[in-house]
């Protein structure tokens, strides 16, 4: 090995797969790093792995050229001084615009994974590891939204989760009870319904 490697990954890379990540994190011995290029052949310096020695050398060079400050300089200014192995990818890598985000969402939806990916992201963000019966939760949310009021859906599913965590309530049982309660509310709100 030619020293430690610094990996940079932007936060807007929804399709970076494990195989590509493995290729990225193993620079060949004769290279200062590995960088991905997008479908149009542009270098993506925030999707790259750099050997720490050459990276520090180039940062020092830039610092000297710019009066000791690096603030506000684009990362691409490091690239000319580094021997990089480039890995070409097909299509866009990142989401820079709202149009990119819309295209990424459509691509995820096309694969039927949007809900699963969202739940995985939420569980990671909240640092929880639990299996969720999405059908049960969606049914409870639907019943609350249609039987009571639209804003009742997210609040109801929150309370369902709270009850499951605090009291050990089975989510399926709680969802059924919520469905029955929502049906009663809807019946009572109908013309001629019970007070």
Image (cartoon, grey):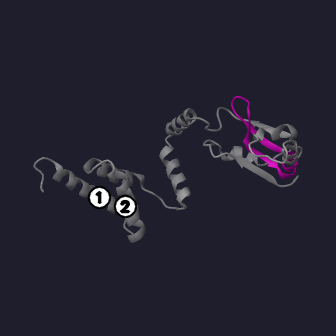
Q: Residue 78, position in %: x, y?
A: 82, 41
Q: In which quarter of the image is the C terminus?
A: bottom left
Q: Which of marks 2 and 1 is nearer the N terminus?
A: 2
Q: In the rendered image, is residue 43 in sight?
A: yes
Q: In the image as oriented, which residue stretches furthest toward the front?
A: 67
Residue found 78% across the figure and 51% down from its top: 6
Q: Hey, which quadrant is residue 161 in on the image? A: bottom left
Classed neighbour count for the residue bearing mark 1: other residues with Cα under 10 Å, few (<14), some (14–19), many (≥20): many
**Residue 148 covered by magenta stretch:** no
Residue found 55% across the figure and 35% down from its top: 98
Q: Residue 178 carries which label?
A: 1
Whole-number angstrom distance, CA of label 2 to CA of label 1? 9 Å
Tell me whether the residue at label 2 lies in contact with that at label 1, contact meaning CB atoms closer than 8 angstroms.
yes
**Residue 56 covered by magenta stretch:** yes
Q: Could you say which is closer to the camera, residue 118 or residue 96? A: 96
Q: What stretch is highlighted in magenta?
A: 33-58
Q: Residue 160 carries which label?
A: 2
Q: Could you say which is closer to the camera, residue 132 or residue 80? A: 80
Q: Residue 192, position in %: x, y?
A: 10, 49
Q: Residue 123, position in %: x, y?
A: 52, 57
């Amino acid at each position: 090995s030619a020293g430690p490697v610094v990996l940079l990954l932007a936060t807007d890379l929804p399709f970076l797969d494990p195989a590509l990540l493995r290729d990225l994190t193993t620079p060949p011995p004769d290279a200062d790093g590995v960088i991905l290029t997008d479908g149009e052949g542009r270098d993506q310096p925030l999707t790259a792995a750099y050997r720490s020695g050459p990276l520090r050398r180039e940062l020092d060079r830039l610092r000297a050229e710019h009066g000791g400050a690096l603030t506000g300089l684009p990362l691409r200014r490091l690239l000319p001084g580094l021997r990089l192995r480039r890995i070409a990818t097909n299509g866009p890598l990142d989401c820079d615009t709202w149009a990119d985000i819309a295209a990424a969402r459509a691509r995820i939806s096309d694969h039927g994974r949007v809900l699963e990916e969202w739940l995985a992201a939420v569980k990671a963000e909240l640092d929880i590891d639990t299996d969720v019966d999405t059908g049960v939760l969606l049914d409870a949310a639907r019943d609350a939204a249609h039987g009571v009021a639209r804003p009742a859906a997210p609040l109801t599913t929150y309370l369902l989760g709270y009850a499951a965590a605090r009291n050990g309530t089975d989510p399926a049982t709680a969802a059924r009870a919520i469905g029955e309660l929502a049906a009663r509310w809807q019946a009572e709100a109908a013309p001629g319904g019970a007070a």
